[in-house]
């Protein structure tokens, strides 16, 4: 098991590095490590010697570092998280990230679920009817082409087909020849989905990233955000919007479209995954295997989008 942990923050005014040392010393045994330097910087080495050291070096009470952990057991990894949870109490701000997205899921796993399941609304029932129609009718040539381009293989394709149908309308694709990668890349970037979402500003990696662009464009053009307006029309700095867009993008991919990205991208996606995991079996990487009736799938989907602040309005 391998994961890189990033930690960045500022100590509170009444605290100093010695307070960090006190907390780190309490957790040394649980994380199978030893303290090799107790002054600033504080250095912690893992006993197996396979991981980079945890280094706490402060400049004007500010910390910005990372550690590549290569351990054998998830318990040791989560023990590191436990140490950072206690450390947060002495920081004015302490941001923890990891390249597997496990921190966000670990933090919220024991908390009450914030997402409430509810019945479908009238417009969502119409959405359901479209899904049921898609189960009966075969996709046309353009749909087949876009679906093949997406490389998405959900257990039920009915939701994917609605996304693709909306996308075709948004991009005004009347034939396969009118599928223009550069236009799709340009719109994705215009909508505020840039490299931080794993996108490229050109078409170099289009085939690899198109599935994400498909979902990004759909989120932006057929949803309102908290009744403030259509997502595509809102400024990037609208409060809460960026975090919700990230959660929706990765959550829809992982939970509903069978395209897994490891752990959660942020705490909002972690909430989505927590809800789903309580009701569905998960795969080896923690991915949610959504196998159910379309009605149930949509109930989960729209309840999750409610939590993120998104309201489906259609084309």
Image (tube, helix red, strand yellow):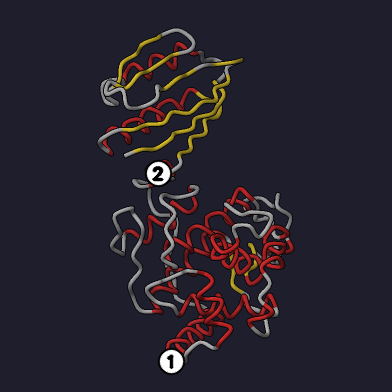
Counting every numbered tag in the picture gives 2
Q: Which residue is identified by label 2?
A: 102
Say which label, 2 or 1, has the lower sequence index.
2
Question: Is residue 159 placed above or below 201 in the rendered structure?
Answer: below
Which quarter of the figure has residue 71? top left
The N terminus: image quadrant? top left
- Mark 1 Cα within 10 Å, few/some/many (few <14, many 20+)? few
Question: Is residue 192 placed above or below 82 in the rendered structure?
Answer: below
Choose between 205 and 305: the one closer to the eye.
205
The structure residue drawn at horizontal position 46% and vertical position 41%, both measured from the top left corner, is: 99
- Mark 2 Cα within 10 Å, few/some/many (few <14, many 20+)? many
Q: Secondary structure at mark 2?
A: helix
Asked whether the residues under the numbered discs 2 and 1 touch, taking CB atoms below 8 Å apart as contact, a structural biologist would say: no
The C terminus: image quadrant? bottom right
Question: Is residue 252 placed above or below 55 in the rendered structure?
Answer: below
Residue 181 shown left or right of residue 163 in the figure: right
Q: Which residue is identified by label 1?
A: 136
Give how far across and how far down residue 113 sits, in percent: 40, 54
The structure residue drawn at horizontal position 45% and vertical position 80%, both measured from the top left corner, is: 158
Distance CA(mark 2)–CA(mark 1): 39 Å
Give how far across and how far down residue 3 sits, in percent: 39, 37
Q: Which mark is residue 122?
A: none
The structure residue drawn at horizontal position 65% and vertical position 67%, both measured from the top left corner, is: 224
Which quarter of the figure has residue 249? bottom right
Choose between 208 and 61: the one closer to the eye.
208
Q: Secondary structure at mark 1?
A: helix
The structure residue drawn at horizontal position 37% and vertical position 18%, both measured from the top left corner, is: 44
Give how far across and how far down residue 85 sits, in percent: 41, 31
């Amino acid at each position: 098991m391998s994961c890189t942990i990033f930690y960045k923050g500022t100590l509170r005014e009444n605290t100093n590095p010695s307070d960090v040392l006190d907390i780190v010393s309490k957790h040394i045994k649980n994380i199978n490590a030893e303290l090799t330097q107790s002054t600033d910087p504080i250095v912690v080495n893992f006993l197996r010697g396979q991981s980079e050291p945890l280094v706490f070096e402060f400049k004007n009470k500010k910390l910005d570092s990372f550690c590549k952990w290569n351990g054998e057991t998830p318990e040791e990894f989560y023990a590191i998280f436990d140490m950072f949870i206690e450390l947060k109490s002495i920081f004015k701000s302490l941001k923890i990230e990891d390249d597997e997205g496990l921190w966000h899921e670990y933090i919220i796993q024991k908390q009450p679920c914030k997402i409430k399941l509810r019945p479908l609304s009238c417009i969502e029932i119409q959405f359901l009817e479209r899904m049921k129609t898609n189960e009966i009718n075969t996709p046309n040539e353009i749909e087949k082409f876009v679906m093949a381009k997406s490389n998405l293989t959900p257990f039920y394709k009915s939701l994917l087909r609605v996304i693709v149908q909306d996308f075709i309308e948004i991009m005004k694709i009347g034939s396969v020849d009118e599928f223009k990668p550069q236009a799709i890349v340009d719109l994705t970037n215009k909508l505020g989905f840039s490299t931080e979402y794993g996108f490229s500003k050109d078409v170099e990696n289009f085939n690899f990233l198109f599935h994400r662009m498909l979902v990004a464009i759909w989120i932006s053009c057929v949803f309102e955000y908290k009744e403030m307006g259509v997502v595509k029309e809102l400024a990037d700095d609208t409060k809460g919007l960026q975090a919700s867009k990230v959660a929706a993008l990765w959550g829809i991919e992982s939970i509903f479209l069978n395209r897994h990205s490891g752990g959660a991208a942020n705490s909002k996606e972690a909430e989505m995954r927590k809800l789903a995991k309580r009701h569905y079996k998960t795969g080896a990487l923690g991915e949610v295997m959504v196998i159910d009736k379309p009605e149930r799938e949509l109930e989960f989907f729209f309840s999750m989008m409610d939590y993120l602040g998104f309201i489906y309005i259609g084309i």
